[in-house]
Image (cartoon, rainbow, N blue to C red):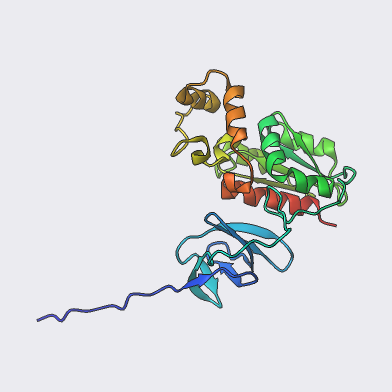
Amino acid sequence: MLKAQWRKKRVVPEVDAEPDLVVEDADSGFCGAVVGFELGAVVLEDRFGKRRNFPLAPAAFLLEGKAITLRRPASRAPAQGRRVTASGSIAVDNVKAQVAKASRIWVEGIHDAALVERIWGDDLRIEGIVVEPLDGIDDLPAAVRAFGPSRDRRLGVLVDHLVPGSKESRIVAAVTDPNVLVTGHPYVDIWQAVKPERVGIKKWPVIPPGRNWKEGVCEAFGVRVPADLWRRILREVNSYKDVETPLINSMERLIDFVTVG
């Protein structure tokens, strides 16, 4: 008779994401201290001051080399007199916006610029960084050369639908200047980076290939004019909590890059 064989189930401990707890994201290897914890994402800051957001998935982090699941600590009373910006940064009072620096952040269009302003505008004004909308990225390599990046004139570019094998990925591959950082998100359009529940839907409509994405989405919403739907979407965005983590991570990388030095 065969004997039943029992395997001991591996138990992954849950650990409170207390401030300054140092953990490593198991997938990317990013290691940093906990500096925030909001709506399913933990914010880690590495020893160079770079911050990234990571979803709170089971067994997604390593603590001293061992797998753990981070969880939100019990709620505490908020610190008195402490304000935060829409991006989640600590607000700095009585500080005027800096004169615009030579470095820039480019985004693909006016909707991207409006969303970035909505969330990161306060931070960018403090740093003196201007966000400029492009009319798409088809001529990005030529535009970068015309800009003339340098160590004191850095350029960050936020690209929609930057996924392997896409047209966008092939265009971006032609930009090799070390003073330029191109990041992106996987969404077809910046609209899709807004969490669907913020606009009253469970998920964004799937638009068939070859169909204009915004037109298809407008049809699904029963709206004729894209500008009308965009105003409705933007009205529901009040902070970084209202957009998806890939967009947050990309923007934080760009801001870090253009504000170095």
Image quadrant holding the C terminus, namely bottom right
What residue is rendered at 74% in x and 50% in y?
A: 255
Image quadrant holding the N terminus, namely bottom left
Number of disc labels? 0
User: Residue 253: where, in percent of width, then height?
Assistant: 70, 53
Q: Is residue 257 above or below residue 125?
A: below
Q: Nearer the viewer, residue 3 or 121?
A: 121
Is 239 left, or right, of 124 in this rendering?
A: left
Is 212 left, or right, of 117 in this rendering?
A: left
User: Residue 250: where, in percent of width, then height?
Assistant: 65, 49
Q: Nearer the viewer, residue 98 or 216?
A: 98
Judged from this view, the residue extending furthest toward the left is 1
What residue is rendered at 53% in x and 64% in y?
A: 72
Res 5 → quadrant: bottom left
Q: Is residue 196 above or below residue 7?
A: above
Residue 241 in sight in this render = yes
User: Residue 131: where, in percent of width, then height?
Assistant: 77, 39
Judged from this view, the residue extending furthest toward the top is 224
Residue 211 in sight in this render = no
User: Residue 90: where, in percent of width, then height?
Assistant: 73, 56
Is 62 left, or right, of 136 in this rendering?
A: left
Judged from this view, the residue extending furthest toward the right is 99
What residue is rendered at 60% in x and 36% in y?
A: 190
What residue is rendered at 55% in x and 45% in y?
A: 164
